[in-house]
Image: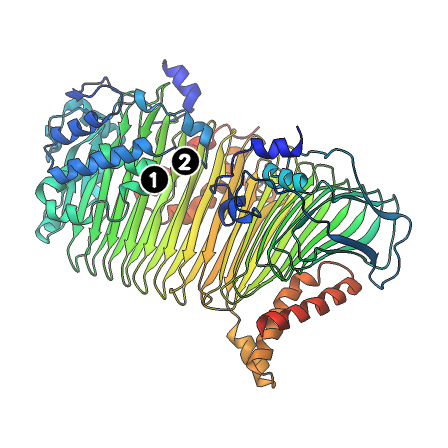
Amino acid sequence: MKSEELYLSLCEPDNSNHLWRYSPWRKVHPTGKVREIPTNYSHPEIEISLLDGSKVPDSLSIDKEDSPDKKNNFSDPVSMSFIESISRDSKFIFKAKKGTILEQPVVLKINTGSANSAINLSLEIGRHCEFELITLIVGKPDWFGLLRKGKIGEGSVINDVVVGQMKRGTLLRVDAINIGKDSQVKAGSISSGSDRTKADLRYMMDENGSNLRVLGSILSADKMHIDHHIEIYHYAPETYSRLDWHSACGGKSKTIGTGMLRVSNGSKGADAGQIFHNLLLSDKAEADSIPELEVSEHDVVGCGHGTANGPIDEEQMFYLEARGFSPDDAKDTLIAAFLNTTLSEMGSDKLHQWLAENLQGELRTLTT
Amino acid sequence: MTDNEAREVVGDYKAGWHDPENSTIRFDAGLSEQVVRDISELKNEPEWMTEMRVKAFKHFDERPMPTWGNMSMLEEIDFESICYYLRSSKATENDWEDVPEDIRNTFDRLGIPDAEQKWLSGVTAQYESEAVYHSIREDLEKQGVIFLDMDSGLREHEELVKKWFCSVVPYSDNKFSALNTAVWSGGSFIYVPKGVHVELPVQAYFRINAKNMGQFERTLIIADEGSSIHYVEGCTAPTYSTDSLHSAVVELVALPGAHIRYSTVQNWSANVYNLVTKRGIAHEKAKIEWVDGNIGSKLTMKYPSVILKGEGSHAEVISVAYSGSGQHQDAGAKIHHLASNTTSKILSKSISKDGGRGSYRGQVTVSPKAENCKLNVVCDALILDENSRSDTYPTMEVANPTARCEHEASVSKVSDNQLFYLMSRGHSEEEALALIVNGFFEPFTRELPMEYAVELNKLMALEMEGSIG
């Protein structure tokens, strides 16, 4: 079935489904008319380079793709088929040949411009690759959709960070990534832009020994509505995952973090955990967390989750102010430190430095 | 169903026998507006109650089944095959000897009158749709404590019932609260006057005896300013091959400074759907505690809730669930912090075994105006074999920056180290497992009256039999 047909055959999702509970599909859909599939969307610009500005080696490529969409059984069909339907002319494949090892992080910059658009990006990362990938989304559209699906090959070590810095509008982001045997993946999300973000990030660990860390540093202000849903599937023995999500919300913004850890029967030795931390910065801000667990295997190392919400610690504020920080500077420093807890885990020192500088700029803009 | 067949279905369920059905009134199976009006007429109720029942029935009829939880099990409920009213005795008796002999024997076997003499302030025993026995200690009655079955409560204290009935759980709250409001019968009505402390617990015992029976008791407890009460309920049913439905509504009102503790040991047989709405409102500095044990039933969906409406109020929910073969215990808690300086604590423990499924489903909210709230949620689950499952679905919605909220959950198996430690001290593997399980449930059992705690430990030991190997 073609994506358009699939999308139109589906019912509007019910809000009892946690994925759509806080951001109903009709509010995420670009026109709000859910039976409508917009046409003639523009093509965002894509650039790829290394972090120092140099060209990427030949073992990496990004090309247009014409082959039919591959389906998987762990994505939400509504959002996936919708992005596939509207991104017919913006379908790309990112390939990393077997054994690609890079010192410098790779930057994939997507500039949406000011028109609505969507990208359907397949990731094909070969076996035993080692590199870091930053996907940076900038622009001022009303609506942008990013679908990333694919596989990280056996034994690869990949740090994959997506930075959402659209100045306005709605960002719909859908990830569906298979984590290969014995691979080690860090999947980072940094969100500090767009009025509304709806992200549905899913990771399938159906091969033995894979290791996944999912990290989030979310900063919201004004009237932003930032909703991340993360599902991790342990469908093979000896798989390990940790989800660590830090959200700082100010203004009248709302952040939502919903997580689902599924451990299937037979995934012996699985070790899964998820933690959501929320820092509330203003009276009008709201943070919602739903960390869910479904465990069908008893022989696990452990499966757990936790959430913690709280304001900025007064003692920490006092400590910094006693050392000469103004209240605003002390507050900014503590917010930055809170977000840095997960930011610093996303990759190498080079990657971290770039992310920290980038986020510091955003922090200044959003909190002043 | 023969005894052996029954045993295969429910294992060693102790309360699975049934007595011959000697009903004095039995409605035909099926639900309609006429059935609802007939129940009301039979009870000679005031018009406002009849109208409320009818409105609730219409709401039930129009409202779809929940689109969450174990939908496949819910879809199996055949509302048309259920009997919505069955009375086995002519009246509610105050003297145990006046209760019909067959019913008396049932409760004797469950140990109810014995318990009353030893450690209770009052007892209500409900058999099918109606309370068959009711008593309260004289000294409490003199202090103005009202402890009646709900039907008598409506007759004798209509104004009080009218004021509070449906005030905590409106009939439109969910499909099953609508069903209960439409066809409720029995349950307890309690009013504790200002400043009165009921030292010993009061107890209600609910028994379903007939096949395809629906039990819809309604309980309303009002604790006036500065008073306190501990209410304990227990439930059992016989083992049949067809399903029964238990859909109760419990409303608690803790006025300023009052304290209500509501303890439940639910041990329905494995053919009972247990779909219950329990909610309390806590006013200034009041305290509501739900102590909730779920051992039996086919499907339980129960999320005791507290609305912390008054400043400085406190809520606690301690729950345990055991899910055996074919069982799904979908239990949890909901707490809404609407006022400042309110605190709450949820502790949930579950064990899944022999293919059973245990789910914790919880919701905690802090409203924008509720300053300085503190809440803590802990969920622990044990999975004892490879066919069982445990889920956790917690929701935390915080809209005030001064709130301090914590949630943690873990799912694990019984530790080999603990088993080895106990076995090296002379326990068999089975005994060791039972001890570990009792230890796992200990935070719950220590909150129960001693007799219930002992009973629960025995029940759990029975459930654990044969779980090794």
Q: Residue at x 29, y 20 (%)?
A: B211
Output the chain of dot 2: B
- Mark 2 near mark 1, Cβ–Cβ under 8 Å? yes
- Inspect this view and state whether residue B111 appears: no
Q: Would residue A247 appear left or right of A94 to someone viewing this image?
A: left
**Residue A218: percent from left, percent from top:** 61, 60
Residue found farthest to the top: B2
Q: Is label 1 in a helix, a strand or a loop?
A: loop
**Residue A326: percent from left, percent from top:** 58, 83
Quadrant of the rendered image containing residue B89:
top left
Residue kind at label 1, given as amino acid type: Asn
Task: Name the one closer to the observer, A19 or B254.
Answer: A19
**Residue to which mark 1 is pinned:** B174
Q: Residue at x 10, y 29 (%)?
A: B98
Residue kind at label 2, given as amino acid type: Pro
**Residue B406: percent from left, percent from top:** 49, 58
Q: Residue at x 32, y 41 (%)?
A: B277
Output the chain of dot 1: B
Q: Would residue B165 appear left or right of B424 to someone viewing this image?
A: left
Q: CA distance from mark 2 to mark 1?
A: 8 Å
State how the image is colored: rainbow
Task: Name the one closer to the observer, B457 or B425.
Answer: B457
Position of the N terminus of chain B, as image quadrant, is top left
Q: Which mark is residue A101?
A: none
Q: Is label 2 in a helix, a strand or a loop?
A: loop
Position of the C terminus of chain B, as image quadrant, is top right
**Residue to which mark 2 is pinned:** B66
Looking at the image, residue A162 lies above or below residue A252: above
- Badge 2 crowding class, 10 Å Cα cut-off, few under 14, some 14 to 19, many 20 or more, is some
- Inspect this view and state whether residue B97 appears: yes
Q: Judge if badges 2 and 1 mark residues of a common chain.
A: yes
Q: Would residue B167 appear left or right of A174 to someone viewing this image?
A: left
